[in-house]
Amino acid sequence: MMITGKSDDNGVVRVDPKSRRGCRRWTEAEDRQVVLGWGHVPLREVAAAIRRTELSVYLRGTRVLGLDTSVPQGFESLSGAARRLGVSERQLREMNAIVGNSRYIRRAVTMPMPGKAPRRFIIEADKADEVMRLWSATETPAMAARRYGFAESTVRAALRLSAARGAVEGIPREPKGTKHWRVPSTVIDAVLTRWVRAETAAAAAARHGVSPHKVARALRKHGLTTGTHAMRDYLRSVAGGVREQYPGAEREIVGEAFDMFFDALAHLRGVAAWRAWPMLPEEIDEVLVRERVIDARARDGG
């Protein structure tokens, strides 16, 4: 860095203040932006908008503009909200990540320290209550299985298949690893209601006194697969997610292996116990009437 100025008789250089580089004056527009974003917009975003450092924005707001660094009105510290709700701060973060919004939790206005993460976080009191309310309305497949008297694997299979088919809205994506799968209780009730009332093609055929082959063919014509076809379609959707986890060359190899497996599966017969797609009796009857397998009087019980 070049220092400009005049030297005295002793050789000491006296720096000219007007010659210093990198120091620009604050404008009214920049001060206005700092005031408007203080406590509502992260310092890094304000600093990036006016092309200044976080520390300079913090010092400008506290020392010159007289802005407060305490918790804003309507907010509370994240640790305080966790204590009020009876959970730990870590649990509140996990709950917010699953049922809340990532922007609910904000960084408190603190002095930026290079190399250190901020330790103070705040959240609106109403948002914290909303996260707790939404969390209380969810449950894991294991909890739902105990409530319905099913096996946990049955509940998970029903949720996965309903999500893949888009039959019930509001099913969150199943997390990877050991994280718990939290699903709203109302969604689980809707999924398992279909699952309990489901009817196989063979049962529908026996109920109407027609051939099971005719029923299965009518359902497949409308895109409603049953038996081995439904099992194959479900496994294809699962395999698609597994295949995407591999890089390019390995993905092709895994895809070919899956295709060979599905080709062999297509020749299987007699998978009568597999009830992959929960079809309600009235849905099956509607398809059978359209395909003229049965008449409307048989559907209505006449």
Image (tube, helix red, strand yellow):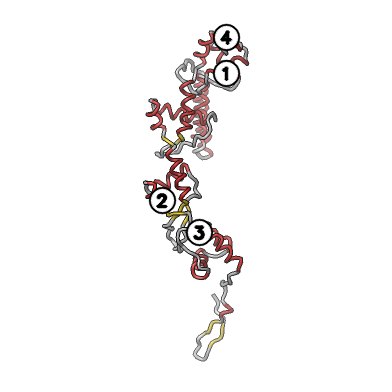
User: What residue is at 41 percent from the left and 34 percent from the top?
Assistant: 140
Label 3, residues with CA under 10 Å away: few <14, some 14-19, many ≥20: many
Q: Is residue 114 above or below residue 182?
A: below
| Quarter occupied by the N terminus | bottom right
| Quarter occupied by the C terminus | top right
- Check residue 302 in the rendering and tell me which mark sits there, or answer none: 4
- Check residue 81 in the rendering and tell me which mark sits there, or answer none: 2
Looking at the rendered structure, the kind of residue marked 3 is: Gly
Label 1 belongs to which residue? 219
Give SS at disc 3. Answer: loop
Q: N-terminal of the two: label 4 or label 1? A: 1
The answer for how far apart the CA atoms under marks 1 and 3 are is: 59 Å
Disc nearest the viewer among 4 and 3:
4
The answer for how far apart the CA atoms under marks 2 and 4 are is: 61 Å
Give SS at disc 1. Answer: helix
Return the x and y of residue 126 as percentages of the image width and height: 47, 48
Q: N-terminal of the two: label 2 or label 3? A: 3
Q: Is residue 3 above or below residue 283?
A: below
Q: Is residue 250 above or below residue 63?
A: above
Return the x and y of residue 273 as percentages of the image width and height: 45, 18
Residue furthest bottom as drawn: 9
The answer for how far apart the CA atoms under marks 2 and 3 are is: 18 Å
- Check residue 39 in the rendering and tell me which mark sits there, or answer none: 3
The answer for how far apart the CA atoms under marks 4 and 3 are is: 69 Å
The answer for how far apart the CA atoms under marks 2 and 1 are is: 53 Å
Return the x and y of residue 2 as percentages of the image width and height: 55, 77
The one nearer the camera, 104 or 132, is 132
The answer for how far apart the CA atoms under marks 4 and 1 are is: 23 Å
